[in-house]
Amino acid sequence: MRVGVLSLQGDFQEHLEALKALPVEAFPVKDEEGIGKIDALIIPGGESTTMGILMTRWGLKEVICKRAKEGMPILGTCAGMVLLAQEVENWKQPLLGLMDVRVRRNAFGRQRDSFECNLDIKGLEGPPFRAIFIRAPVITEAGPSVEVLAHIDDYIVLAKQGNIFACAFHPELTEDTRLYRLFLGL
Ligand code: GLN
């Protein structure tokens, strides 16, 4: 299985490191050709506005959306979650719009810019997942075809719509590979 990590901006290197623990071939992708060659795509954390602008400028939006519609699994983490959304609250930025959700950026406010917590994730066996949130977005509204996999109070922090996964936290910063395995169907 060939897993591409979108490497325009953000913490793609951490994903590439983390994926070494899995039986997959992982490499950075940043152009149409690269995206054409992979079986799954990860969109990392970083700055979603910057990533969206670069994606649009380099014509990657179309090819990512095309591959998504053909069924390629896509995981967006943190800023990647924002980019997958159809709508961002009170803000205009280029989006892929692949998921029927509304997202709130930096939802946990400034005093809690970063935190860790134990999360129960639907479909993950074993102990709770240690989730690291860094200026994290959340899903505040989701359409009927979106499956909620984890939440903190009313905020959805992990969700799936068909082959598309959106994750508010950073699985690449922990040793726990269960979330990648769930996403990749391993
Ligand atoms: N707040 C950032 C954004 O919306 C995401 C932060 C992150 O990816 N760690 O782009």
Image (cartoon, grey):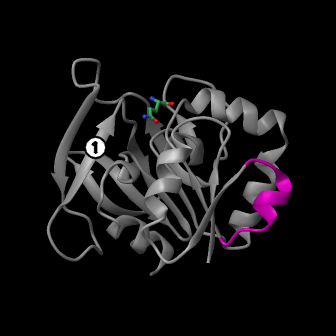
- Tell me: 1 left or right of 13: right
Counting other residues with Cα less than 10 Å from the Cα at mark 1, is it few (<14), some (14-19), or many (20 or more)?
A: many
- Residue 61: x and y in percent read 76, 47
* Residue occupying image coordinates x 36% and y 53%: 171
Residue under the point 22% across and 18% down: 111
Q: Is residue 109 left or right of residue 168?
A: left
Residue at (43, 58) in percent of width and height: 18
In the image shown, does 41 or 27 lie closer to the viewer? 27
The picture places residue 161, in percent across and down from the top left corner, at 51, 65
Q: Quadrant of the C terminus?
A: bottom left
In the displayed structure, 89 sits above or below 73; it is above
Question: Which residue occupies 55% across, 23% down?
Answer: 91
Is 168 part of what is drawn in magenta?
A: no
Outermost residue, bottom direction? Answer: 186
Residues in magenta, as a range: 30-39
Q: Amino acid at mark 1?
A: Ile
Taking 89 as reference, is 44 above or below it? below
Residue 97 vs residue 81, the one in the foreground: 81
In this view, 29 is above or below 104: below
Q: Is residue 144 visible?
A: no
| Left or right: 132 as drawn, with respect to 159 | left
Secondary structure beneath dot 1 equals strand
The quarter of the displayed image where residue 176 is located: bottom left
Q: Which residue is mark 1?
A: 132
Looking at mark 1, is its residue's CB closer than 8 Å to ligand 1? no
- Asked whether residue 138 is in view, the answer is yes
Taking the view exactly as shown, the residue that stands out farthest to the top is 110
Q: Nearer the viewer, residue 97 or 45?
A: 45
